[in-house]
Image: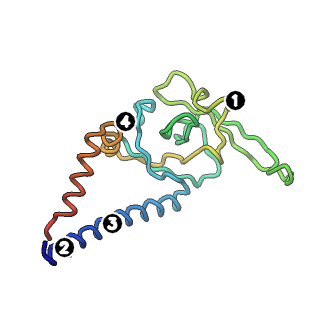
Amino acid sequence: MNLKSTRLQLNNALTMMMVIASAFAIWKGLSVVANSPSPLVVVLSGSMEPAFQRGDILFLWNREEKLSIGDIVVYNAPQRDIPIVHRIVHEHVVEEPKSKKDKTLTTQQYLLTKGDNNERDDLPLYGYGKTYLNREKDIVGNVKGYLPKIGYVTILITENVYFKYAMFAFLAISALFSQE
């Protein structure tokens, strides 16, 4: 290996690291702007058909103080590894003290959700003893837009181990051996 070839490979590796760092910075920037830990979500099931199909990418926004019946939200269920995308079917608003020491009343919104393609509400998904989702603590974001089918790459990577390794190997090899 000569010096020029080594420099080229080092340059390619640094370029790849810059691309990864830039993607991470963009993701974190979107998270701050949307006030959501996950501003983009891929639909992984058919529970929201026909509104959203499996593989659609959803854009989330979490800056509204109050959500309405009919809004589509994303939340994390305790026993599930994936975020759940469902529609609000019922709300319950309660005034509660901020804490045990601070008796100032604050308004809390509690939500009941259901998938459009499901027969029953999501109560069994919330966890033992929980009857509603807390707007402040449980909701990841409110769906504001979507791109159809673009997220299928994520589904292929998640569900097919061979595809995942083949794709990463192809990207690594092409990054290291590209001749510019």
> Mark on residue 129?
1
Mark 3 vs mark 2, foreground winner is 2
What is the quadrant of residue 43 in the picture?
top left
Q: Earlier in the sequence, mark 1 or mark 3?
A: 3
Q: Amino acid at mark 2?
A: Thr
Query: Helix, strand or loop at disc 2?
Result: helix
Q: Circle 3 sits in a helix, a strand or a loop, which is it?
A: helix
Q: Which residue is mark 3?
A: 17
Tell me which residue sits at (54%, 30%) in the image.
114
**Regarding mark 4 in the picture, which secondary structure is present there?**
loop
Q: Residue 74: which numbered mark, if any?
A: none
Q: Amino acid at mark 3?
A: Met
In this figure, which residue is indicated by the disc labeled 4? 54
Tag nearer the camera, 4 or 1 = 1
The answer to which image quadrant residue 128 occupies is top right
First in sequence: mark 2 vs mark 1 = 2
Q: In the rendered view of the protein, which quadrant contains the N terminus?
A: bottom left
Q: Which sits in the foreground, 106 or 51? A: 106
- Mark 2 and mark 3 in contact (Cβ < 8 Å)? no
